[in-house]
Amino acid sequence: MNRQKQKQVERYGRLMDKTTDDAVRIMVAKSARFTSRMMRSSSELVLDRHFDTLQRVIVREAIGLSVRSHFEGIASHPMANKTRFGLDVRQSTTFDRARGFLSGKMKLTAANIDAIEKLYKSSATRSAVDVLKVAKQSVGKAVKQFGISRAVLNEALGAAGVLADKPHLYETYARTQNALAFSAGRLEANSEPEIQAALWGYEYSAVLDGRTRPKHAALDGVTLPKESKRWKKIFPPNGYNCRCIAIEIWKDEVDDFKKQDIESVNIDGASVRGSADIGWDFSPDEILQ
């Protein structure tokens, strides 16, 4: 990967970290009232009701995060200053600027933006159900073992990652929704005829640190044309908390890259086949269909 592409990967990482951190702070603040009520629950039925309310709260916040990240994916596009997505990439790409830019350049109305929010409702809800199921199971197990008390619930909710000082479940949820929406926005931008005409394909880039899943690390360097059917199975993100990204390769630079369809690599003496996590073998733009 050349230096320009590496800078793009680094910029993406910083953007994902900032957007995720902002979302987690909001989720923690919005849910604090309900987690406090949970700790005063007198029965499992009451506890379940509070979990249902908490789910609605974080889904609502996740939809807003998804819309912001979708627009970020468009506004931070590497060809943004060459096409009708004409926002200079050196400018701030906050949600408000992206929304204002798109409203002006693409004539989006409030109704159009509301429609985009509705498209993300399904994925935000599905992900919330998945992550909160983990929390509910953790809390339920503690209650069955030790009974309901404020101390038991405080420890169980903290271990589940839904308290202000231990928000790791929110971090997983926010980063995942963030990455999905960002990639969907980028793919929407890439579907434009003027961008399609210049786009050759993508290079898969994994972070390659101690947190990277082996089967994601095995995909690092996969370089294929945009029409390759394999992208329908491996376009990142490829699981919860996935930090991988696909970098655009343009037709005027394709000679600098070598087409690589890597099936498996050797990691720590074992052959690892590159793939998405179970249930994640789809293209991010499919969540909008």
Image (spheres, rainbow, N blue to C red):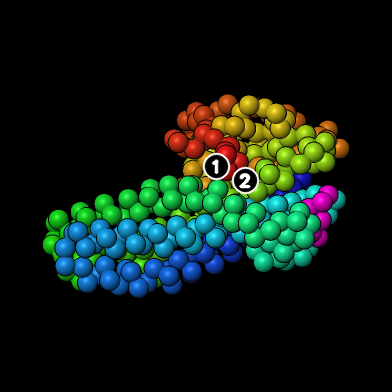
Q: Secondary structure at mark 1?
A: helix
In the visual, does 144 lie left or right of 224? left
Q: Position of residue 194 (x, y in %)?
A: 82, 41
Tell me which residue sits at (49%, 62%) in the image.
61
Mark closest to the chain's N terminus, 1 or 2: 2
Return the residue nearer the eye: 49 or 171: 49
Q: The residue under label 1 is which amino acid type? A: Ile
In the visual, does 268 lie left or right of 54? right
Q: Is residue 247 magenta?
A: no
Q: Secondary structure at mark 2?
A: helix
Tell me which residue sits at (72%, 64%) in the image.
100
In the visual, does 134 lie left or right of 198? left
Return the residue nearer the eye: 273 or 134: 134
Tell me which residue sits at (76%, 45%) in the image.
2
Tell me which residue sits at (81%, 56%) in the image.
86
Q: The residue under label 2 is which amino acid type? A: Ala
Q: CA distance from mark 1 to mark 2?
A: 8 Å
**Magenta part mainly helix, strand or loop?**
loop
Q: Which residue is mark 2?
A: 184
Characterize the local packing of mark 2: few (<14), some (14-19) or many (20 or more) Cα atoms within 10 angstroms: many
User: For the N terminus, which image quadrant?
Assistant: top right
Q: Position of residue 206 (x, y in %)?
A: 60, 44
Q: Which residue is mark 1?
A: 287
Magenta-tinted stretch:
83-89
In the visual, does 144 lie left or right of 128? left
User: For the C terminus, which image quadrant?
Assistant: top right
Is any part of residue 7 visible from this angle?
Answer: no
Verify CB contact (< 8 Å) between mark 1 and mark 2: yes
Q: Position of residue 237 (x, y in %)?
A: 55, 44
